[in-house]
Image (cartoon, rainbow, N blue to C red):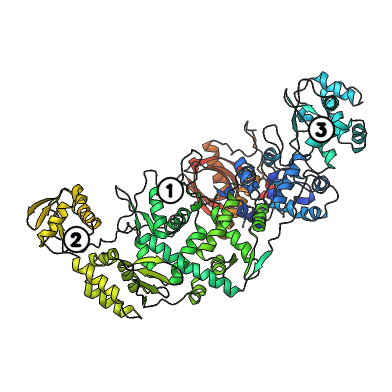
Amino acid sequence: MGTGRLTGRRDQEATVPEASTAAGSAGGSPAGSSPRSLAEALRARDDAALAALLRARPDLLGPVPGDVTQLATRAGTRASVVRALDRLDRFALQTAEALAVGPDPCPYPVLEGLLTGGEDERARAALPEAVATLRDQALLWGDEDRLRLVRTARELLAPSASRPSPTGLGPTVAEATAGMSPTRVQEIVAAVGLPATHDPVSAVTALTGLFTDPERMSALLDEAPAEAHQVLGRLVWGPPYGEVTPNPTPPVRWLRDRGLLLPATARTVVLPREVALHLRGGLAHRDTAPVAPPVPALREHRPQLVDANAAGQALAAPATVEELVKSWEHAGPPVLRAGGLSVRDLKRTAALLDTTEQQAAFWAELAYAAGLLAGDGEADERYAPTPAFDDWVELPPAERWSHLATAWLAATRTAPLVGEQDTKGRTLSALGPELDRSAAPEVRRRVLELLGELPEGASPDPETLLARLAWERPVRGASDLRARLARWTLAEAEVLGVTGRGALSGPGRALLEGRDPAPLLAPLLPEPVDHVLLQADLTAVAPGPLRRPLGDTLAVLADVESKGGATVYRFTPGSVRRALDAGHAAADLHAFLKEHSRTPVPQPLAYLIDDVARRHGHLRVGAASSYVRCDDDAMLGEILADKRSAGLGLRRLAPTVLAAQADPTVLLEGLRAMGYAPAAESRTGDVLVARADAHRTPARSAPVPVPEGPPVPDATLLAAAVRAIRAGDVAATAVRKEPAVTSPAGVPGELPRTSAAETLATVQAAALTGSAVWIGYVNAEGSASQRVIAPVRVEGGFVTGYDHTADEVRTYALHRITGVAELADDQV
């Protein structure tokens, strides 16, 4: 960035808490000296390293820090540090945990001893990379002889009585004796053979020196009874706390008298950290994991076989989604008041799809995530297809699958949570508002990436894959959500056709790489067929996926009996009546079957159609309240005599007309349940086509996934942020001339304070001489900043000049300038 004629910068900075982290692999400090603060370490980074930090921790950009000092302070906030720790791999986290229980600052050889014990070569080889990772994440700063874990991270990872450390270590001697009486401390000092001191601080120092001296400590432990060693053995690897009775056993009393066990509460004792480290041989962890667990291939299949299996699932997935969404286009299930689908409606959907409730929830959530299904927004809200569904069903099968798979990969909706309870004890419902899990897309993608690293056609043992994921992102809390998400991903990917036989398919690999998988999937799918094979047992076999007009009509005329490579449809009186209700005449149905069947139309099927058509519409139902009309008065008498008609409230109005108290829909269903085939008629006496208009929601966009933290910034934003931070740093560190009269403020980092007259005179003089000045400025939003400008024109209450920090000409309102100061001579 251009800095005009400014050639130097002041190395003054506000003292930054160690909680703000130090930084990058490019870290270091000028002239080879050790950085004295986190801000100084960050300032020593080049632009590429600073951008890498902002990319790894995008929360630091909200909003863009004004300078490096603000960046360092923000990087040390608790929320930001917690987020950064959660993204460390297991060994990097173990390194941070070792630093938290080590000295502060910690020389590199001491850290190496805490992690390797001088014997673990794999840990020794992996340690430099782990330290570099902590630096890159701004969780560690300082040279190798003075490594400093930021204070917030140390507070989070160091052991305490309420939060044990993952290392299993307890407090130090100094921490454990903080509330102990000076007399008791002196008694412990005397018991271990140390000379008495004049104050408790020096006594604790002497005791710490004994416990950290291997030779003297070994000699002290040689005097301990055997039972005392057993007590220490139970506490050494943690937890370091143990309960004691008011009258402890002799071994415990021996350890307590010599400070090898120190009181934590009235009923518990704790093993001091120094003692535990001696017993452990200097190790902070019992087991370290310096190398990521491998994910070997468990089985190997021919890639063609994998793709074929995946293609079969990929063919079925869009068909299942289409069947579900179409079943909701006339009278979809209502939306619960709290949002989501009721348990009863989920059961009905599962029965419709002939699958489990969990699978039904998955398909419903997939359709919702793909934007094919939504609430209609009416007062009595129901789920219905969106207008996008009509476009989707017209796509080729491969493109339909690609749309679903892309939505699945990015969705934060997690259907397997349906039926579980939230933190308030409420049951989570399908399509409900509480199913988003921001970690889901990342876990899905990482699972597929690990599958993609195997040879084509190879599938791993799921347990090895889960172990690898646990190493890459160890769970610091009690939740096992990431492991569950990984298991669900493996199952969903297989059902969806992203994988086949546990191996990543060719279309799945393209999906993962961001390419369109449709061209790879299309050759694997069978071509739609335009015919069926009619059987004598009133069934039809579709030898493949049916073309759309044929499939739609057959779905009305017959019921699906079984699915698979070939779909079996069964013709029943009810299905034929459904086709007649939809407006098809018997002659149309005969012609349709003759045209699309490769086998002759069986006589039983022809008889079935004619028989249902003969009786269809013989009875007529209309809306008076409702009525039944029939030319055969004997049939009406038969209906009146039937006990099953009692609930319909029928009575004869004329020889050929019955009136009913029930509405027409209920009357139609009641008569059909009695074995008749009535047809509805209009007010003019014409037969009504019972096909309902397909209901659609207003235009809806697919739900936006809930991100896990701030989005990763792109290169343009990173470059602008780094430029702004550097610019602010130039202004914040520029050296100013000392004023003739010392201001009482003079606190580093504060905005300059001058009167309005002084401000105007100084900027006018700078405009005449062409020199630069340092100003404090508060914009219209109330945001304060420090700028270095070279005024060119001062008029009308505004100063216009070249802003060195922004590298452009800008205009500033004089009344918003808090103060102004001239730059030191060596700065211009």
Q: Residues within 10 Å of mark 1 (few under 14, many from 20)?
A: many
Q: Is the Cβ of the residue at disc 3 closer than 8 Å to that at disc 2?
A: no
Q: Amino acid at mark 1?
A: Gly
Q: CA distance from mark 2 to mark 1?
A: 40 Å
- Residue 541 relative to residue 716: left or right: left
User: Which residue is denoted by mark 1 in the rendering?
Assistant: 432
Q: Mark 3 or 1 closer to N-term?
A: 3
| Residue 366 rendering spot, x and y as whole percentages | 45, 58
Q: Residues within 10 Å of mark 2 (few under 14, many from 20)?
A: many
| Residue 449 rendering spot, x and y as whole percentages | 61, 63
Element assignment for label 3: helix
User: Which residue is denoted by mark 2 in the rendering?
Assistant: 678
404 w.r.t. 55: above or below: below
Q: CA distance from mark 3 to mark 2?
A: 88 Å
Q: Amino acid at mark 2?
A: Pro
User: Which residue is denoted by mark 3 in the rendering?
Assistant: 231
Specify the segment rendered in magenta.
Answer: 328-342
Q: Mark 3 or 2 closer to N-term?
A: 3
Q: Amino acid at mark 3?
A: Val
Q: Quadrant of residue 258?
A: top right
Asked if residue 414 can be seen in this view, the reply is no
Element assignment for label 1: loop
For this rendering, which residue is in front, 542 or 323?
542
Viewer-nearest of discs 3 and 2: 2
144 w.r.t. 502: above or below: above
Q: Mark 2 or 1 closer to N-term?
A: 1
Q: CA distance from mark 3 to mark 1?
A: 53 Å
For this rendering, which residue is in front, 686 or 487?
686
Is 43 magenta? The answer is no
Viewer-nearest of discs 2 and 1: 2
Is 333 magenta? The answer is yes
| Residue 129 rendering spot, x and y as whole percentages | 74, 55
